[in-house]
Image (cartoon, helix red, strand yellow):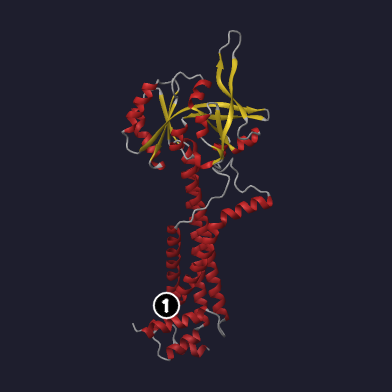
Amino acid sequence: MSERGVALPRYIALRYVTVGRGSGLVSFMSAISILGLALGIALLLTVLSIMNGFDREMRQNVLGIVPHISLRAETGLDDEQWRALQAQLAAEAGIESFSPIIEMQAVVATEAGNSGVMANGVDPELESEFSAIDRFMLEGGLNNLGDTHWGIVLGEPLAQELEVDIGERVRLYSPALAVNPLTPRVNFREFEVSGIFRVGSRDLDGRLVLINREAARALFRLRGPQNALWLRTGDVLEAQGLLQEIAPQLPPDVTADSWITQFGAVYENIRFSRDLISFLLWLLIAVAAFNLVVSLIMIVRDKRADIAVLRALGAEPGIINRIFLWQGALIGVTGIGLGLAAGILGSLYISDLARFIEARFGVELLNADVYPMDYLPSSLQFSDILTVSAGVLLLSLLATIYPARRAAAVRPAVALRAE
């Protein structure tokens, strides 16, 4: 095909898309098609980025702190038995690290109030390597637990509820009662606040406290060195499958569960919501593509006289066909460009916009009691940009086939006689 054979259809299509004399209807229909595609792309890209953000935050933040697999021994194992179990599991592919833990339900209290919590006795050095909690420290840190035997690390909402700050003291009550000849006595110790963190998850920020493992052992009156062993896997999504593999190898008095027990439903809801919303937004884009078909058909009817003149001057049906194929492609590319620009900006600034709306109007967009985090995350991925662009361009090209064929089938004599 000659350069002239390519340039002429492209030139005419460009004139039809842009504003020109006598082409008000054509330009208006083109603008409507472009805006429809751009709006669908911008919404789809922004929503995909938000759902990617939820997925990333769940994987890196929430699931970066909670154990992927937890092993618990209610009756208690001695140090030798725990070491033997850990050595046995170390040979399993997929397990990256272990963390010995003392897990107990407790109550933390001050004069301002009290709250039920999950108290985890940890080794500060091991926990820093095992967990991502250090990334979320607002004040202090896990290292202070090693320096202060009776130190405690808690979440920001819990610290605000108890009205305490770094260096102040709280009481931690143990469910194990102190033995007294006359009457049972509540067992508690005072702890100094050594760190405050904020993950953004109400389950973690409001219910999790960390203390030194030796302090936990003394407070909860445990004979063994620990009552739980946390496992971290290479792929968090493989944790449940790995749990099923190692479960038959565990001693009878050891129970096991994975993060699926606590956060599995939330994570599946996020993934389902992403798929459902993406499907609905793709339907919106499909409607915009159908609108492109209608727009091009109307343009063909409006330009029947021009088509007849071109045919009378010797233009072949293939040239007429390519004019409207080019027009559909130009509308699609323009819509994609505008939609990508708006979608990328929306994806990059949606978190800031959500914070501004919350601060300006005093509303809570995400309730931490319902959602796994109390902020709106966003993660723009190049693969989404590429997939959306390719998909919309393909729909735009498919939408031009029927109108282009109708334009090529216009008969010059009939069209000129009608004019």
Up the image or down, 309 lies above or below 208; here it is: below
> Percent x, y for residue 141?
53, 36
Q: Is residue 49 visible?
A: yes
| Frontmost residue, 2 versus 193 | 193
Residue at (61% x, 32% y) in the render? 167
> Percent x, y for residue 332?
47, 70
| Frontmost residue, 25 versus 410 | 25
> Percent x, y for residue 220?
52, 21
Residue at (48% x, 67% y) in the render? 336
| Frontmost residue, 301 versus 104 | 104
Up the image or down, 91 lies above or below 5; here it is: above
Q: Is residue 405 left or right of residue 109?
A: left
| Frontmost residue, 237 versus 155 | 155
Q: Is residue 267 left or right of residue 184?
A: left
> Percent x, y for residue 313?
42, 91
The residue tagged 1 is 405
Which amino acid lies under the numbered mark 1 shown in the image of this protein?
Arg
